[in-house]
Amino acid sequence: MDVSFSRRRLLTLSALLPLATILPGRAHARGIDSERIIALEWRPVEMLLALGIMPLAIADKRNYHRWVREPALPDSVVDVGLRNEPNRELMQRLRPSAFIISKGFGPSESDLTPIAPCWSTAFNDASGRPLGLLERDLLRLGQFLGREQKAVEHLTYLHQQIAATREKLPANPKPLVMFSFLDSRRVMIFGANSLFNDLLERLGLRNAWEGKTNPWGSAIVGIETLVRLENVTALCFMHGDDDPVKTVAKSALWQVMPFVREGQLHLLPAVWFYGGSFSALRFCQLLPEALCA
């Protein structure tokens, strides 16, 4: 496991702290009120929270509590509707000072700039390392909002937790297969380009799924595909009491899964697959608990 990797990152971020303390607050210069920012996708929500900013409103708040769960949002945060098609009239009435959006999902900057200025982030880039991109974008957002020091402090904490998680892992763990049920016949599985895969590499772990994935690091496959994965530990992320795994667990096909027969299946609570630093921290919290159980 590459301990020096984390140390190098910590040193780099720590070096930015003195600079962050003397840079002027750019949000004030732009007329952006940090209490009136709308985030239209859940990764940007996490980014604002990482900077100590509670969004004025988000999209699809009900499903945020189901799929992301943490950090929890207070009742005061307004729900502006669907992430891909939010309620424009409601957003206009809220008079936001800025929008934080995800590139390639939901309204574009040109759709929203008549209401308020936009700042955008992407989940991934050509590197296939969404966590690395998040680190750069959180520093960039911190600069945009005059929260540079907060961004550096949060990322330093993230790297410390990743290093601490690495120390808690068992010796010589099996490769991991990570998935979540979409229905009783299909799962979403996570491989290259995913947030989880980026974390596994930093933790010195191997992803058992080597199949193709989309730009967000996931693929949809039939559950019968999982039968081929032998000598692995399975992490199944659940989403509420009605999760399909509870029905599938009774099927004959499920009982012949190698990881089920070997007692290597772990049911975990929700972690947002396409999330930010808080999703990464939640993953780091749950992983040792599962592997060391």
Image (tube, helix red, strand yellow):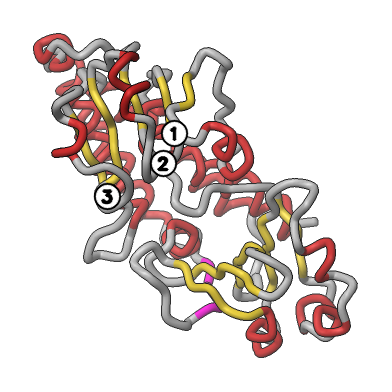
Say above or below: 77 vs 194: above
User: Disc number at residue 121?
Assistant: none
Tags 2 and 1 touching, CB below 8 Å? yes
Q: Earlier in the sequence, mark 3 or mark 2?
A: 2
Q: Position of residue 30 (x, y in %)?
A: 11, 15
Image quarter of residue 16: top left
Q: Is residue 155 visible?
A: no
**Is residue 165 left or right of 193 when viewed as pictured?**
right
Three-letter code, disc 1: Ala
Name the residue beneath numbered marker 3.
122
* Magenta stretch bounds: 205-209
Report how far apart the C-alphas of labels 2 and 1 lie in the structure: 5 Å
> Residue placed at 23% from the left, 31% from the top?
141
Q: Nearer the viewer, residue 159 or 229?
A: 229
Separation of disc 3 and disc 2 at Cα?
Answer: 15 Å
Disc 3 crowd, CA 10 A, few/some/many (<14, 14-19, 20+):
some
Label 1 crowd bin: few (<14), some (14–19), many (20+), radius 10 Å: many
State yes or no: residue 206 in magenta.
Answer: yes
Check disc 2 and report the residue beneath it: 83
Please give the name of the residue rendered at 44% of the width and 39% of the height, measured from the top-left corner: 82
